[in-house]
Structures are given as structure tokens and as C-alpha cells.
Image (cartoon, grey):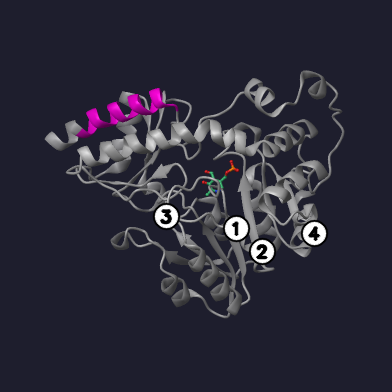
Amino acid sequence: MRDYYFNTDFDLGSSGVYSFSLRDIQDICGPSADEMASIIFDDSMTQGSPGLRSAIASRWGDGNAEAVMATHGSNEAIYLVMNALLSPGDEVVALEPVYQQLWAIAEHIGCELKSWRLRQDRHFSPDLDDLKAVLTSRTRMVVVNFPHNPCGVTLTRSQQQELIRVVSTVNAYLVWDAAFSDLVYMGERLAAPNHFYEKAITFGTLSKAFGLPGLRVGWFIASPDVIHTCLHVRDYLTLHLSPMIEFIAQRAIENADRLLALRLPSVIDNLDRLRSWATRHEEWIEWIEPQGGVCAFPRLRAVDDVQAFCQELAEAHRVLLVPGTCFSIPSHVRIGFGSTADRFNEGLRRLTQLLDIYVRC
Ligand SMILES: Cc1ncc(COP(=O)(O)O)c(C=O)c1O
């Protein structure tokens, strides 16, 4: 992403919906120029401003702002939680494949990593028996992300309950990355597991469903002792968010449904287009329709080296696509369908052109 994100014109790689401007946010969510101008650039609270935490708690938690910590994107939340709770040698079970930070930080700390593998031959559908097979009484943390980046799979409510039960039998922390919880097309929306398990930690973000990746606002919901430990880690890192960012983020969350309503129709149209494209080119593409999020993870049958393919697509055709090698699944690619219809169509057209060349070779 570092190499190609800023050097391509058509984004079929990202995992969020296309971004809003400050003007959009002001028009939709109401912070007036006057309100913005009266923000004082004081330090903010390490845990996040009470207004922002209340907005997060009301929408995704149980209303208790004390159970929320606001962070610089959920990336900071992942970093804080793992550094606060894990020590070298701790056993951590993480989904595989999974968003890189969710395992790399635990690995960097020196934890012993085990995988709950989403199997290709089962279309990446999560199987709780596979999780049970790797859990032990030493497991300190189980790390999951549903709806899943990049595979687009999720759990049913009863599977979520079973997951909580299984993790609680070994008394491990359950890290639940809910980055895409507001983007579900098939199946059930899942509540934060904190409602059912006190050792659950739920991550959220404004970067994916709400088109605000550059605002850099994420959070986690956890028990007071976890938050307390994370506050100390943050003292050595970022201290707090800017009051201006907190103010905009609070308004965005208070108007989250309006932001979603402005992006969901184009996401659903793009998904329809992707479905027709995949059906039209069945001989080239094997795919499972995503249940949530804005990514699909198809296999390109004609492409042996997806890394080289994505490089050529980026350099010669200016289209960003993520090779499955980034997720250790080399035959697949991640296609994001969160961009505008025009850009998505043109990106797909260029991708088809290159695929056609590969198929003929
Ligand atoms: C599953 C998941 N979690 C967390 C993040 C981090 O998002 P941010 O730091 O922008 O909130 C991402 C970004 O791609 C992601 O895919």
C-alpha cells in the first residue's frame, strides 16, 4: 500500500468507502464554521473527550462512556491493547488470514502465535472446531475480525455466542475487530461481544464505513481495568487526540446513519457490478460473494504470480489491487468496491483488459 496507494488513479485496493470532505461533514453533520472556530486547542483527555466517548458508547456500546477509549484510528487501539495486555511468550490465537496489525504487533511483542485458519477449500467460512483445536489453557488472547478483511465472511449470532463461550472456557481476552460492523449485506449484524463477556475488547473506526480514514479516529470498548492499563501505554505514545478531531468525530458519529445512507447505495451498486463481472468471467475468476465489508477476495485462475500481476496493474494501468501474498494466500487478490461508481467501473475495465492478456498467454 505504501508503494502504490498514492501512485495509482483507480482504487480497487482499499477496504473503505470513498471519503467525505470537511465541507460534506459540515453540511451533513452540522458543525458550523462558528463552532469550528471556537474550538480551543487545549490538551484533551487521554481516554478521549467525554462527548466523543458518549457518542461511541451510545451507538456501539452499552451507553457507558467510561468503557470507551478513543484512539488515532483503530490501529492505535490495536497497538495499545496488545502492548498493555501481552508479554513475550504469551500464547495468542489470531485468525489467518487477517489484517496485518492484528497479528504483527503480538508477534513483535514476542508472543507465541497460533492460527485459527480460514480455509480456502471451505471458501474461508469460519469453523469454530478449528478454533477449539488450537485453544489451550495458556491462550491469553483470541483475535478476530468479522465481517472479515479481506475474505468478506462473517459469523451468525449463534456462532458469535459459541465463539464467546469457547474463549471464556480458557478465560482468554477476546479481541473483536468490528471495523466493518456497519457494512453487512448478508446475514446478521453482530453486537459488540462486550455485552456478553467482560474480557471482550471491541475495536471500531471511522475509516471504513463512514468515509473518514484521514480523520484518524478509532476506539475500543473494554472493561475499566483494560482501559486503565492502556492509558499508561498512551502516555508514552500519542497522549491524546486533537480537540478539533474529537469534535468532528463526535458529530460524525451522532450522524453516522446519514453518512452511511450516503455511501451504502453506491457500495451496493458496485457490489452488483462486481457480481455481474465475476459471473461474466467465471472461467477466470472464482469468488465468494462478501457478506460484509467492502472487499472481495477472489482467486484469479489465470494468474500464477499475483504479486507481479498487481505490480503490472498498478504501474502500467494505474489500478490499485492488493495481491493475496499480503495475506499469505498467493492465488487470490483483494478487490475493494468502496470507490465511486465511475472509478470502480474504470478500474474494473482496466483489470479485465490485463486479465484478458494473461488468459491469452
Ligand atoms: C480489520 C481492520 N482493522 C483495523 C484497521 C485499521 O483502521 P484505522 O486505523 O484506519 O482505524 C483496518 C484497516 O484497513 C482493518 O482492515
- Which mark, residue 226? none
**Percent of width and height locating residue 267:** 44, 35
Q: Amino acid at mark 4?
A: His
- Which mark, residue 228? 4
- Dominant SS type (magenta): helix
- Residue drawn at x 45%, y 41% is 294
Q: CA distance from mark 1 to mark 4?
A: 24 Å
Q: Are marks 1 and 3 in contact (CB under 8 Å)?
A: no
Of the residues tagged 3 and 2, which is closer to the observer?
2
Of the residues tagged 4 and 2, which is closer to the observer?
2
- Residue drawn at x 42%, y 55% is 153
Helix, strand or loop for disc 3: loop
**Percent of width and height locating residue 49:** 81, 42
Q: Amino acid at mark 2?
A: His
Of the residues tagged 3 and 4, which is closer to the observer?
3
Q: Amino acid at mark 3?
A: Val
Furthest-left residue in view?
Answer: 360
Q: CA distance from mark 3 to mark 2?
A: 22 Å
> Where does the magenta region start and end?
340-355
